[in-house]
Amino acid sequence: MDFWKMNGNGNDFVVITNRSGLSDSDLSDLARRVCRRRRSIGADGILVVEDCDGYDFKMRIFNSDGSEGEMCGNGARCIARYAFETGVAGENMTFQTLAGPMRASVKGSFVELHMGIVPSVPQVVPIDLTGWGGELEGDFSTVGVPHLVVYPGEGEHSREDLVRWGRDLRNRTDLFPGGTNVNFSCPSGEGALKVVTYERGVEDLTDSCGTGSVASAISAVVRLGYPLEVQVSNPGGVNQVSLSRCGGGFEALLGGLALVVTKGSIEKEA
């Protein structure tokens, strides 16, 4: 099976076209196997192009634990570039996801993703975590997938702390019945944020999260009075988020790099 290895600001994926009719269980098993680092190709997930009536294609994403995700911003940018460069779609395209249709524009290695309307302002959620230092508030919203944005405050927080807090919050099914991604956000200047995301399905911190960048930008606009253009710095790179108010929510545009790392064939031993 042919594949491309791609990354959006370090959020990395194995990208394939499902031409052989692989079932959902086949794709889930494939994700668990090929996403293993050091033992196989290694990735945060696999992206799958499938045919879809009325659209250029359908995007599916399977996380490294085999679960299927509704949407992934960095992944959507990568699959858009893949679709353009493999002739599946033109440089301006519309594709279907489990979170609804998306539009993308490919300009070389830079891809802009029109993510539609985030339907409401974030829901404020009280948080009390052991070792954090008291009760705080987080902002919960759905940007294709569920996201919680929290502000850990000034000072150094170890990777172990963020993983522990992220795992605890991700599994608070009393607050988030389907689980949630957790974004640790820190203001870093006018219109700028630094964000680290604990991703549901990967079950670890990742170098970048596109939908998390959008959720964090919306939180900063609502909670902190940020402008509608927000630069979100993840450990792996920068996502540009442009928002416009639409009714009680926000229309979101996500821009950033989608890079091709390598192309090859997935062997049975992988």
Image (spheres, grey):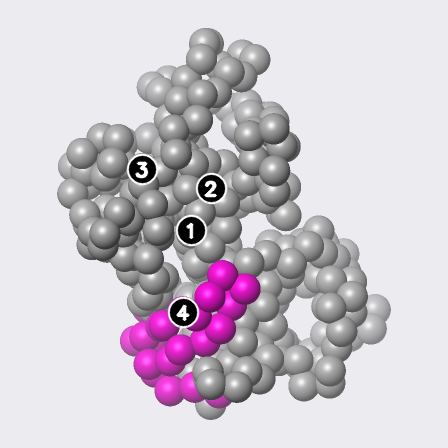
Q: Which residue is mark 1?
A: 143
- Secondary structure state at the residue bearing disc 2: strand
Picture quarter with the C terminus: bottom right
Callout 4, which amino acid?
A: Met
Contact between marks 4 and 2 (CB within 8 A): the answer is: no
Q: Residues under labels 3 and 1: Cα distance?
A: 12 Å
Query: Left or right: where does residue 80 sit relative to residue 15?
Result: left
How far across and down, in percent of the image, does residue 115 sit? Answer: 36, 61
How far across and down, in percent of the image, does residue 163 sit? Answer: 58, 30
**10 Å crowding of disc 4: few (<14), some (14-19), many (20+):** many
Residue 213 sits above or below residue 21 on the image: above
Q: Residue at x 62, y 32 (%)?
A: 173
Q: Using the image as rendered, state which of residue 9 and residue 50 is in the foreground.
A: 50
How far across and down, in percent of the image, does residue 140 sit? Answer: 43, 36
- Decide if residue 30 is in sight here: no
Q: Which residue is mark 4?
A: 102
Q: Residues under labels 4 and 2: Cα distance?
A: 19 Å
